[in-house]
Image: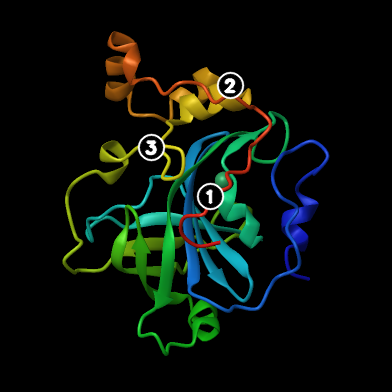
Amino acid sequence: MPLETYRKKRRFGVTPEPRGKSPRRRTKKLAYVIQKHRATALHYDFRLEWNGVMLSWAVPKAPSLNPADKRLAMPTEDHPLEYNKFEGVIPEGEYGGGTVMIWDRGTWEPEPESADVDAAMKKGELKFRLHGEKLEGGWVLVRMHRRGAEGRTPWLLIKHRDEFVSKRDITEEAPRSVVSDRLLVEIARDEGGNMKKAADGDPPALLRKMLENPKLVKPAKKSRKKSVWHSNRGVS
Ligand code: MN
């Protein structure tokens, strides 16, 4: 059953996360999203649309534009497509409790485009291209040979060599939400989350600058009801 694990882990009367409709068949470009998530620990949830759901990995150290960096990517349960629009606060004590930011989004395609994605997932080596606002170009997800915590086998997320390779730290350079331009601390403030906990996922140098010049702080959103970001831009 698609999304069964996703739904079992959550109480939808308590968390503002979407329950998710039944998986749809694909009609347009495949969606890609990364959600920066300050839960028990900070991580980046990397998601690729496939077969009507978002295949998901948690990347603790964030993706790197440097092909020399092999970033650990722990597989997590498939998420509904609607989750791509979720930015807000998961209540403390709930599964994944903490602040969620839509850090990057766009579309993706397997590389080559004719590649059999199901076979690649089974084999544990998926090559793809990203067309995001922050991440672009060729990447690979490779399953490791050893077992990890809870019997889950970790994967590695690695940048391919192409014109988008860089030694710049994209997480320091572009720490804000691609939909609301907010930092984690600003999302926590607007949605009634734990600001102190959220702030330690934001770049310390930027937070220091904001304290010296409070004009850099985004004004609070008027309504606190809207945890799901509705935008006409980009993919669904
Ligand atoms: Mn997460």
Q: Quadrant of the N terminus?
A: bottom right
Q: Quadrant of the C terminus?
A: bottom right
The kind of residue on which mark 1 rests is Ser
Label 1 near label 3: C-beta < 8 Å? no
Q: Is residue 53 above or below residue 150?
A: below
- Mark 1 highlights which residue? 231
Tell me if the residue at label 1 has its CB under 8 Å from ligand 1: no
CA neighbours of label 2 inside 10 A, class few (<14), some (14 to 19), many (20+): some
Front position in the image: 215 or 91: 215
What is the C-alpha distance between the residues marked 2 and 3?
A: 17 Å
Percent x, y of residue 38: 52, 34
- Mark 2 highlights which residue? 194
Percent x, y of residue 203: 33, 28
Q: Which mark is residue 176?
A: 3
Helix, strand, or loop for circle 1?
A: loop
Label 2 vs label 3, nearer the camera: 3
Helix, strand, or loop for circle 3?
A: loop
How many numbered badges does the structure rendering display?
Answer: 3
The kind of residue on which mark 2 rests is Asn
The numbered mark, 3 or 1, whose residue comes first in the sequence reads 3
Residue at image point 52% right, 29% down = 187
Percent x, y of residue 62: 38, 47
Q: Is residue 75 above or below residue 93?
A: below
Percent x, y of residue 49: 54, 68
Quadrant of residue 22 within the rendered picture? bottom right
What is the C-alpha distance between the residues marked 1 and 2?
A: 25 Å
Residue at image point 48% right, 81% down = 120
Residue farthest top in this picture: 212
Position of residue 89 in the picture relative to residue 164 (left or right): right
